Image: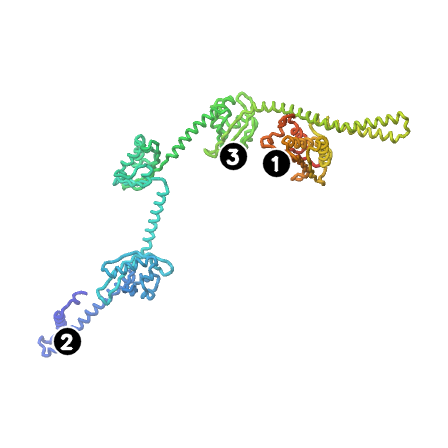
Amino acid sequence: MGTKQSLTTAQLRTAAEVRLAETQPPMLHAKSADDLLHEVQVLQIELKMLNEILRQSQVALEESRNRYISFYEFAPVGYLTLTHAGQITEANLTAATLFGLGRKKLLGRRFDSLVATADRERWRHCFVSALGRRSTQSLDLKLDHGNGSWFYGEVQLRHQDDNAAQSAIRIVLSDVTSRKQTEEQGLAIKERLELALNATSDGVWDWDLRSGTIYRSPHYFDIVELGPDEDSRNFSFFKKTIHPDDLPRALKAIEAHIQGKTHSIEFEYRLASRSGEPKWINSRSMAVERDTDGKPVRIVGSIRDITARKQIELALVEREAQYRAATETAADGIWMVDAANGRLLSVNDAYVRRSGYRREELLTMRLSDIEADESPEAVRVHMENIRNNGSDLFETRHRAKDGEVWPAEMSISYWATGGGRFFCYVRDLTDRKRNEAVRQEVRAEMEDAMRFHVASQTVAAMAHELNQPLNAVATYSLAALHMLRNGNPKPNRLLHALESNAQQARRAGDVVHDLLEFLSTGEVTTNPEDLNDIVHTALYRIEANSLNLFQSRLELDANLPPVSANRLQVEKVMGNLIQNGIEAMHGFGISPKNIVITVRTSTDGKMAQVTVRDSGPGIDAKTLHRIFEPFFTTKQKGLGMGLAISRAIIEAHGGQLWAESEPGAGASFHFTLPFAP
């Protein structure tokens, strides 16, 4: 407060007398008669001086108070005073702001009402502890921000009881939300890192080059199959785990990185064998901290067990060797072609031999150089289609070095790797084509023989058809001769006999004409026919010759339109199918022998369909697959041509003949015929 605030009463009296002497008129003597007046004047001056001192002290106190209030109110931390019951009696502006409340609403509230439920027990324990101690207590709490949100506060509380009447808990409150969030983020990062390290099979290490110590994760020791020991935090532990043959290469890579020659370190090495089985490790690391000179002071890395990958690589190398051996010894040609330009990248020995070119010559050529059927543009378009579709199988012709053009079957697959590759198998079809030509000749001969056999089988049916008109011709001729010889005067009867004779002769001629046409062309002459009537006729002939050996049931469509058919030949097919069913049932002693014949429209509505179903033993899948082959038979007698001929007849009509069966469930034979136009 200055020297004036520290004056004693004596000093004040002396100072007052000095000031009084300074204000007395010159004629006033030191020894005045009126001492009382002097005393009063001195006291007045003392009072004035004392008032001045008090005024100055008041100003200083007010300045100090204002500074305290400013410091208290606007401090960056909250100040609160609590009663022993935990009620807030004082709070600065910062505290009110932190809680999002006006000061009036804050005062009188219990502090624990502002604490999150999960933290209240910790708060109460700390509060009680502060009441019984003189030391500062501290804890972090989750506190109500007043608007439905929360903040984290660091609470320091101390019991103050200098005056028993004013004993209270003083609190300093700091907002540590950012710090807590940072801590939580750090914990989350640490947790994620630990989870990642636990989830991965990699071992992690952290090398402090300044201290020479190395941290190694638990997975590290699992991989190297060694537990932590006195050397596990030193570099010597690494030397102990690596195979001696791989150590120099590893040390060279590490030294090059320390000298700044490489951005990172990566090498593969084998573990020093303990189990007898080789174990391969991949090591990756890099400097993450350097000193002012740029030298590494901290290197972090990981190791990974790559034994399985190495085994796969070795297997691939072995497989590639096998592939090359298979490629070079294959009888077919094998290429690898660049999809970008069609150039041959590799060819095997088989294609070198077949083409007549040297391998070096072929590797300078393109597909279009050896393709004999397609132009270069057509080859390009074809390759583009294969690229889009993935593969293709087709026949073409190649041109050998000597000019020979030979047939080839190409099987090409597209691989997108390596910029695009075509992998091609090339099969020489020269022998196959030659054999096919021979087979076609044999097939033609067999077809001729089959047609002849069909005709011979058909002749029997035709003989029956010819027998009736020829007998009629003979009868009518004899009647006419008889009338002429006897001079019969009835010309009408003679005319009828001659006209009937001519009609029956034409019928016989039609039968012969159909036979000759089929023998010469393999085609049949068809007419609109009633398919139901054909079925009745064929069944009647079989029943007449079978002596009631079977029972039949007809399921006919009465409204079926006429079909386009050669009646005699279709009757022959029907008879063959019915007879086969009877023989199959008879051979296995099945009784009763049932034949069901169904006539209906096919499912597509374009054809008539006939089904002949028996109750026999059925046909196994292997036999069913071959049943229509020429000369295939399961009977002790017979040529095995019946079903083959029947199929040929139906197909000549424009229909189809097929069989369905399951062993033990009988057999069903179906054929279709086109409707008459």
Query: Along the horizontal axis of the image, is 98 left or right of 324?
Result: left
Query: Along the horizontal axis of the image, is 98 left or right of 388?
Result: left
Mark 1 Cα shell of 10 Å, populated few (<14), some (14-19), many (≥20): few
Real-space Cα separation, disc 1 to disc 3, in angstroms: 45 Å
Q: Which residue is mark 1?
A: 665
**Proximity of marks 1 and 2: CB atoms separated by less than 8 Å:** no
Q: Which residue is mark 2?
A: 41
In front: label 1 or label 2: 1
Which residue type carries mark 3?
Gly
Q: Which residue is mark 3?
A: 390
Query: Along the horizontal axis of the image, is 456 left or right of 338?
Result: right
Q: 320 or 598, which lies in front? A: 598
Q: Position of residue 87 (x, y in %)?
A: 30, 64
Which residue type carries mark 2?
Gln
Q: Position of residue 444 (x, y in %)?
A: 64, 24
Mark 3 Cα shell of 10 Å, populated few (<14), some (14-19), many (≥20): some
In front: label 2 or label 3: 3
Q: From this view, report whether residue 115 is shown above or below residue 457.
A: below
Q: Position of residue 591 (x, y in %)?
A: 65, 34
Count how many numbered circles sit on residues in the image. 3
Q: From this view, report whether residue 454 is shown above or below residue 62.
A: above
Look at the numbered disc 1 and give the secondary structure of its residue: loop
Look at the numbered disc 3 and give the secondary structure of its residue: loop
Look at the numbered disc 2 and give the secondary structure of its residue: helix
Q: Quadrant of the C terminus?
A: top right
Farthest top residue?
402
Which residue type carries mark 1?
Ala
